[in-house]
């Protein structure tokens, strides 16, 4: 890991890890609400019951957060994971009714919480691209 990646990886890794840890015991209505929102954007997720979906999401976030914090995992690799995760969040933002202003990509007041996650997509792509261009220079 490049030292210049440290602030990005630690801040995002801690954030994602905390998010995953907070979802570990998600059940009932909370799990159903999260599952319902996710299935609106990604219908294939309907194959998982809400409680199992919450556990899988929690595990994925814990794994991604831990990988971002582990200095021995290449930045390009964790960047791919972060990009995939952020792409799912971006899809959630784009496909969930009420998140955007009518006919626009601009977030509604309700959508700001999801729209802000686009920074994760940018960070993931930055780690991937830096890893690819660094290899070419070497």
Image (cartoon, rainbow, N blue to C red):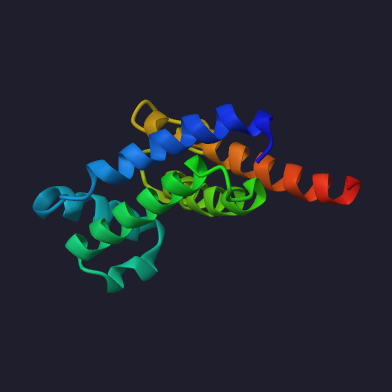
Residue at image coords 32%, 37%: 18
Residue 72: x and y, percent? 58, 48
| Left or right for 37, reference 135 | left
Residue 14: x and y, percent? 41, 34
Depth check: give the residue in front, 27 or 1: 1
Q: In this view, does 5 lie above or below 67?
A: above
Residue, far front: 72
Residue at image coords 54%, 36%: 9
Residue at image coords 53%, 48%: 82
Would residue 114 be seen by someone viewing this image from the given angle?
no
Quarter of the image with the N terminus in it:
top right
Q: Quadrant of residue 28?
A: bottom left
| Left or right for 74, reference 60 | right
| Left or right for 26, reference 78 | left
Q: In this view, does 43 lie above or below 69?
A: below
Q: In which quarter of the image is residue 53?
A: bottom left
């Amino acid at each position: 890991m490049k030292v210049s990646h440290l602030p990005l990886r630690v801040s995002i890794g801690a954030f994602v890890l905390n998010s995953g840890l907070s979802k570990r015991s998600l059940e009932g209505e909370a799990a159903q609400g999260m599952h319902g929102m996710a299935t609106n954007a990604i219908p294939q997720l309907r194959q998982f019951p809400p409680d199992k979906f919450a556990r899988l999401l929690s595990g994925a976030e814990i794994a991604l957060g831990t990988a971002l914090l582990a200095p021995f995992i290449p930045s390009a690799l964790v960047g791919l994971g972060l990009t995939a995760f952020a792409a799912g969040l971006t899809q959630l933002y784009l496909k969930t009714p009420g998140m955007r202003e009518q006919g626009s990509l601009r977030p509604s007041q309700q959508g700001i919480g999801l729209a802000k996650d686009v920074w994760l997509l940018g960070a993931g792509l930055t780690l991937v691209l830096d890893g690819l261009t660094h290899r070419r220079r070497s």
